[in-house]
Image: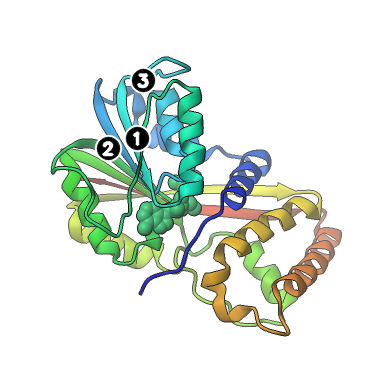
Amino acid sequence: MEIQYQETTSDLLTRIDIHQKYGGRDIDQWMLDLLDMPSFPSAGRILDVGCGAGKQCLLFHRALGGGVNQKSRAEITGGDVNPELLAKAREENARLGNPLTILDLNFNQRFPFDDNQFDLATCCFAIYYAVDIPFTIRQMHRVLKPGGRLFSTGPMPANKQLFYDLIREATNNKPIPPMPGSSRYGTLILDAMKATFANVEVHLFENPLTFTEVEPFLAYTRASLNEDRKIWGSFFDEVDTFESVMARIAEAAARRLERQGKLVMTKVVGGFLAQK
Ligand SMILES: C[S@@+](CC[C@H](N)C(=O)[O-])C[C@H]1O[C@@H](n2cnc3c(N)ncnc32)[C@H](O)[C@@H]1O
């Protein structure tokens, strides 16, 4: 089934910004540590699949010694289908003197690379939007060199419990549609990765976002529901319109804040690290 999914630049960047401002832990550092970047081979090649505005490409660029007009010691390529996000990635790449390769890449199609090209493939918060997840995983496997690694991140079932609790409270327990990420990432998607790669490690990252006011939580919720609105499908109807649900979530969040003095929404992310 094709998942109708269109990320908007402002929604994605809003969420990234809120993670950075209100989170206690740094997912970028967690990923760099897991990947042991100091040992990354010189002139090694990295492919970031579903690169969005280039967050991971830019992180690798800096972690591998790159700067403005300063190449890193790796060759970094990012690919995505969203023109708006690709434009953002290209804008930042240009500002740095174009050390990265940013290309149009639809992960539902055969990747435009020969076999055995990359030392590392990454796919952060994106694999669950693939039409045929095993196909996309096999493409990433195909373009990796023997011994090359795939690193993927996505939400585990316990992700963002507060967000779902307050939506349930605001809608009198209206059933929430299964989310393509958290409902499958730790099960079906992990199994698909194990079916293609002999060796898959599972790592967990937990990041409590702590809000002492409702506004940033509501901004996050708005940016998440917007992103997911097609996925949420039947959830919004003539009675429960997006704005009416948002207004009731705001009331539920205010009540919770009054009772508990803070709102804590914990991001629970799985990092799957596989080797070819
Ligand atoms: C939540 S965003 C994550 C972006 C980036 N990796 C990050 O962490 O900031 C999911 C990304 O998957 C991309 N995506 C969705 N469908 C895709 C497809 N068929 N081929 C390539 N990328 C796709 C979206 O355009 C979006 O950039």
Tell me the distance, in whole angstroms, between the alpha carbons under discs 3 and 2.
Answer: 15 Å
Does residue 115 appear anywhere in the picture? yes
Q: Nearer the viewer, residue 223 or 150?
A: 223
Q: Earlier in the sequence, mark 3 or mark 2?
A: 3
Residue that appears at 58% across and 39% down? 25
94 above or below 2?
Answer: above
Number of residues whose C-alpha sits closer than 10 Å to that of mark 1, classed few (under 14), some (14–19) or many (20 or more): some
Give the labeled residue for mark 3.
72
Quarter placement of the C terminus: top left
Q: Earlier in the sequence, mark 1 or mark 3?
A: 1
Kindly give the residue lying farthest to the right in the view shown.
258
Picture coordinates of residue 122 (x, y %)? 34, 43
Q: Earlier in the sequence, mark 2 or mark 1?
A: 1
Does residue 29 appear anywhere in the picture? no
147 above or below 237?
Answer: above
Residue 188 vs residue 262: left or right? left
Number of residues whose C-alpha sits closer than 10 Å to that of mark 3, classed few (under 14), some (14–19) or many (20 or more): some
Tell me the distance, in whole angstroms, between the alpha carbons under discs 1 and 3.
Answer: 16 Å
Quarter placement of the N terminus: bottom left
Give the labeled residue for mark 2.
120
Q: Amino acid at mark 3?
A: Ser
Q: Are marks 2 and 1 in contact (CB under 8 Å)?
A: yes
1 above or below 190?
Answer: below
Tell me the distance, in whole angstroms, between the alpha carbons under discs 2 and 1.
Answer: 9 Å
Mark 2 sits near ligand 1, with its Cβ under 8 Å away: no
In this view, the mark in front (2 or 1): 2
